[in-house]
Amino acid sequence: MPEKSLFPPHQLYDGRLKACAARIEAHPLPLHPQCSHTQTNPLCGDVVTIGVAKNSAGQNVFGTKTRGCLLCLAAATIVCEIGKATLPLSSFDAWLRAMIDAIGNPSPEVATRGDSFGILINQVNTSTASDLDALMYVRHFPPRRQCVTLPLQVAQTVVASIGDEPERRG
């Protein structure tokens, strides 16, 4: 009799992630982004473009054009929602790094570390924190980790590019 998994695969695609992925339409790629970046997952063909533009209040607004699986869509949605939050870019970059580390390197010391990851989760609203909790389950499925980290890496490239640009004055 095969050993029963502690992490049933059907739980990877729970209702929270399905609802999160469905919200992607609320985050279209800006028509005239200040910066955008596209990357393709060479393993499965997921394609993620993330762009950022300033809204009328001068806040960064992230949007995406993503063609991918449910996990990729959910991660891209979360990136845009947290990117639109009132986090400074340095905090958003730290959050992206913490997420990539927590998902892509699920060693016991990283998975149980509650420092920057826990602090950054507390900065987002309750529904997004619930989505993050559901998304973190992918740590237990190595072949699917890249589906989640791809949008995070694309956003990280965009944030780094924005940080390199001189501040625009109106």
Image (cartoon, rainbow, N blue to C red):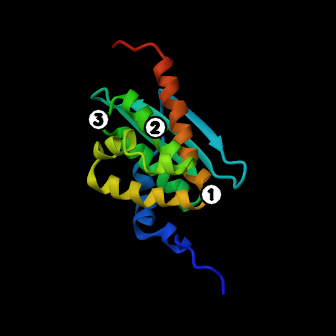
Horizontal and vertical percent position of residue 52:
45, 33
- Above or below, 155 against 150 in this view is above
Residue 86: which disc?
Answer: 3
Horizontal and vertical percent position of residue 51:
49, 36
Q: Which tag, 2 or 3, sits closer to the chain's start? A: 2
CA gap between label 2 and label 3 equals 18 Å
Residue extending furthest toward the front: 109
Q: Nearer the viewer, residue 116 or 145?
A: 116
Helix, strand or loop at label 3? It is: loop
Q: Which tag, 2 or 1, sits closer to the chain's start? A: 2
Q: Which residue is mark 2?
A: 30
Helix, strand or loop at label 2? It is: loop
Residue at 66%, 87% in the rendered image: 1
Q: Nearer the viewer, mark 2 or mark 3?
A: 3
Horizontal and vertical percent position of residue 76:
49, 49
Helix, strand or loop at label 1? It is: helix
> Amino acid under label 3?
Thr
Q: Nearer the viewer, residue 13 or 70?
A: 13
Residue at 58%, 79% in the rendered image: 4
